[in-house]
Each structure stands twice: as structure tokens, then as C-alpha cells.
Image (spheres, rainbow, N blue to C red):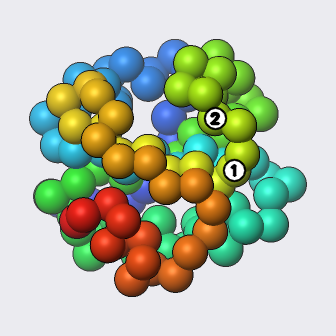
Amino acid sequence: MSAEVIEVSDANFQGEVLESELPVIVDFWAAWCGPCRMVGPIVEEIAKEYSGKVKVAKLNVDDNKETATKYGIMSIPTILMFEKGDIAKQVVGAMPKSALIKELGI
């Protein structure tokens, strides 16, 4: 199984995230956001290390305003963990990998 971070959008969010059998970690980010660029590699490491246990996705808030608005994303980076279509955990802001894993409970 390949451990990669998938790009999600307004168009495929329902199928990729809300209907996923696995818990899904979604990184809400934007290209201009410095802290988002710090979190990006951490999210990719989590995708590799927890492959098969969680699905990891990124959603660009500038390109997918509908989904970002639906989930009340006011500041980025925001990471939401979905389980069976519901938000299970929420982390706002950049943090070290160990802290992020602890916050998400994975």
C-alpha cells in the first residue's frame, strides 16, 4: 500500500474523507502560509508511518473555499481528523510531530 498524502477538493471531499473506512487526517493549508509549509513535511511523515491505519489528505483553502467554510476554518494550518464522517479531533497551528501525533491520538 502506498503511503502518500492525497489532495482533496470540494469535489471529492465527500468520497475521500467523509465516506472513508479509515480515519482521515485533513491538513487545511495554503501556499502562502509559512506555518503550513512547516507542517507539510510532518503530515507526509505521518502518512508514511501510519499507512494502513489512517488516510492523510491536504486541502488547499484558497482553491476549495466551500469545504473550508463548511468546517469553519478560520486560521491555518488546521488539521481535522475525521472518523466515520465526523470530526473526531481538531488541531490549529504548527507544532512538532510528536505533539501532533499526541493531539490526534494516533
Which residue is found at the position 35% from the left and 47% from the top?
Answer: 89
| Mark seen at residue 73 | 2
- For disc 1, the marked residue is 76
Q: Where residue 65 sits in the image (x, y, percent)?
A: 70, 23
Tell me which amino acid carries mark 2: Ile
Residue 14, above or below 39: above
> In the image, 67: left or right of 62?
left
Q: Quadrant of the N terminus?
A: bottom left
Residue 46 appears in the picture as rendered: no
Which residue is found at the position 15% from the left and 58% from the top?
Answer: 53
Mark 2 crowdedness (10 Å alpha carbons): few <14, some 14-19, many ≥20: some
For label 1, the SS is loop
Which residue is found at the position 13% from the left and 35% from the top?
Answer: 21
Residue 10 appears in the picture as rendered: yes
Work out how far the residue at label 2 is from the one at label 1, CA to CA, in angstroms: 7 Å
Q: Quadrant of the C terminus?
A: bottom left
> In the image, 61: left or right of 27?
right
Q: Where residue 41 sits in the image (x, y, percent)?
A: 55, 74
Count the marks: how many? 2
Residue 88, above or below 4: above
Q: Are marks 2 and 1 in contact (CB under 8 Å)?
A: yes
For label 2, the SS is loop
Q: Nearer the viewer, residue 73 or 27?
A: 73
Q: Nearer the viewer, residue 71 or 61?
A: 71
